[in-house]
Amino acid sequence: MAHPYRRRGRRKVCRFCVDPSLPLNYKHPEVLRQFLSERAKIVPRRISGNCSYHQRLLTREIKRARNVALLPFTEMP
Amino acid sequence: MAELWSRYESLILFDPDLGEEARTELIGRVKEYISNASGRILKTDHWGLRDLAFAMKGRSKAYYLLVEFAGPAPVSTELARRLNLLDTVLKFQTIKLEDRLDPSELPGPGEEPGVPAAEEKAAEVAAAARAGDVGEAEKTEE
């Protein structure tokens, strides 16, 4: 019984759970960057598909990276 | 009971306009701040000159230095106090990696926390810097 409003397409998975070797700390801004929007906002979990544990760590690390100018606080697209 | 230590990691952003010599001298001084507060440096990583994600104090680049160290509780506040006094430090961030550590189980000599063997290189750099600029180095002895 298919739900009429069921989302189509690929199921989202937490990239940090799939690949535990993916570094999740402020010293790797290139990884964190992928979880920022064009305006440098943190991408919400419902979009990125991260699990709550990794999203929490991600948020903390992005904020740390911002403090030392490795990531922007804001950016114009 | 012996005092428990914590392990910290500091990322320090130095002024990019500093000359090579002035920078090594400054880095040697920062390391002295840690050892003078009875801390022990475990690792240093020179990231070098990097672009900043946003301009800071009119600079678009900074020299990044990552220092990992361990010490009793006051070491991080003392380092922060000292770094805040330096106008050649654009910004820094210290993160506590681990706490409630037994200092004798840490790498390096347990007896002389001020002069860790792993820091020979740093001592050389500091010594070289001191030889190069005696007047500046003396300030750190206070």
Image (spheres, helix red, strand yellow):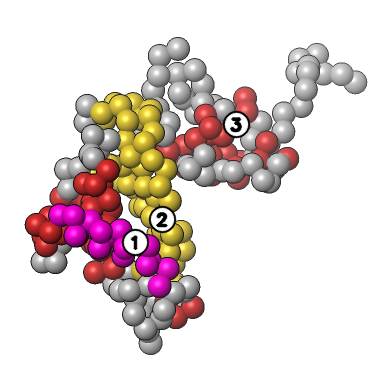
Q: In the rendered structure, are the residues bearing label 1 and label 2 in contact, judged by CB atoms less than 8 Å apart?
A: yes
Q: At which x and y percent is residue B29? A: 23, 58
Q: Which residues are magenta?
A: B117-133
Q: Quadrant of the C terminus of chain B?
A: bottom left
Output the chain of dot 1: B
- Between B62 and B25, the one nearer to me in the picture: B25
Q: Is residue B109 left or right of residue B75?
A: right
According to the image, label 2 marks what residue?
A: B44
Image-quadrant location for residue A44: top right
Question: Which amino acid, mark 3?
Answer: Arg
Question: Which amino acid, mark 2?
Answer: Thr
- Between A76 and B106, the one nearer to me in the picture: B106
Does label 1 or label 2 sit earlier along the sequence? 2
Residue at 52% x, 29% y: name it: A33
Q: Is B116 located above or below residue B2 in the figure?
A: above
How packed is label 3: few (under 14 Cα within 10 Å), some, or many (20 or more)?
some
How packed is label 2: few (under 14 Cα within 10 Å), some, or many (20 or more)?
some
Q: CA distance from mark 3 to mark 1?
A: 44 Å
Question: Which amino acid, mark 1?
Answer: Ala
In magenta stretch: residue A10: no
Residue at 49% x, 35% y: name it: A29
Q: CA distance from mark 1 to mark 2?
A: 9 Å
